[in-house]
Image: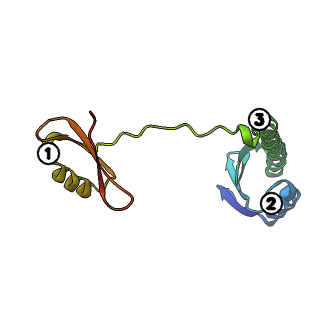
Amino acid sequence: MNVRLTARRMTLTPEIKLYCAKRLKGLEKSLDAGTEIDVLFSREKRRHGVELRAVSRGLNVTVREESDDVFGALNQAFDSLEKKLKKEKKKLLDRRRRGRRERPAPPPPEEAAEPAKRVVSAEEFSLKPMTVEEAILNLDLRKGDVFMFRKLKTEKWALVYRRRDGHYGLVEPE
């Protein structure tokens, strides 16, 4: 636990520091080890104010109290901080427990749904008429597996694809 004491328009006496250390010792069990606590003391005319800010992973609590006496303000601030910490911890635990209860049971392995097939559009075609050799060159340039084009003489659609054996295939619909 990392503690910072700051005073505005007043001086921190050893009694105040000792009292803060004593009260924070009692809060250690409800705070994580990495919690940072800022204690800010301020004085305006005859009023003493104490602001406590506790920050840790998943927790951000701020409490501000005022009183005529520094120790009275400290007592009120630490009591309020304790209440807020208990409330926040309870919320966190309830949220975790609720998350476990509401999850549906996973389906049996044989009924597992297959992922939905999706269609991915590709711009692997040419509108201008060309020869089969030009289509193969375009296929190589685009580093794709399939290239669709219009044949030069007939203006019908055709498809050139790369085969697994390294050769090229040609598909001409009727």
Asked whether the residues under the numbered discs 2 and 3 touch, taking CB atoms below 8 Å apart as contact, a structural biologist would say: no
Quadrant location, the C terminus: top left
In this view, the residue in front, 150 or 50, is 150
Please name the residue that numbered disc 3 is placed on: 104
| Cα gap from disc 3 to disc 1, whole angstroms | 57 Å
- Residue at x-position 85% and y-position 55%: 27
Give the structural element (helix, strand or loop) at label 1: strand
Marks 2 and 1, the one that precedes in the sequence:
2
Please name the residue that numbered disc 1 is placed on: 130
Q: Amino acid at mark 2?
A: Ile
Q: Quadrant of residue 159?
A: top left
Asked whether the residues under the numbered discs 3 and 1 touch, taking CB atoms below 8 Å apart as contact, a structural biologist would say: no
In this view, the residue in front, 57 or 138, is 138
Q: Quadrant of residue 105?
A: top right
Please name the residue that numbered disc 2 is placed on: 16
In this view, the residue in front, 13 or 93, is 93
- Residue at x-position 28% and y-position 36%: 173
Q: Is residue 29 left or right of residue 132?
A: right
- On the image, the x and y values in percent for residue 156 come to 19, 35
What mark, if any, has residue 40 been given in the picture? none
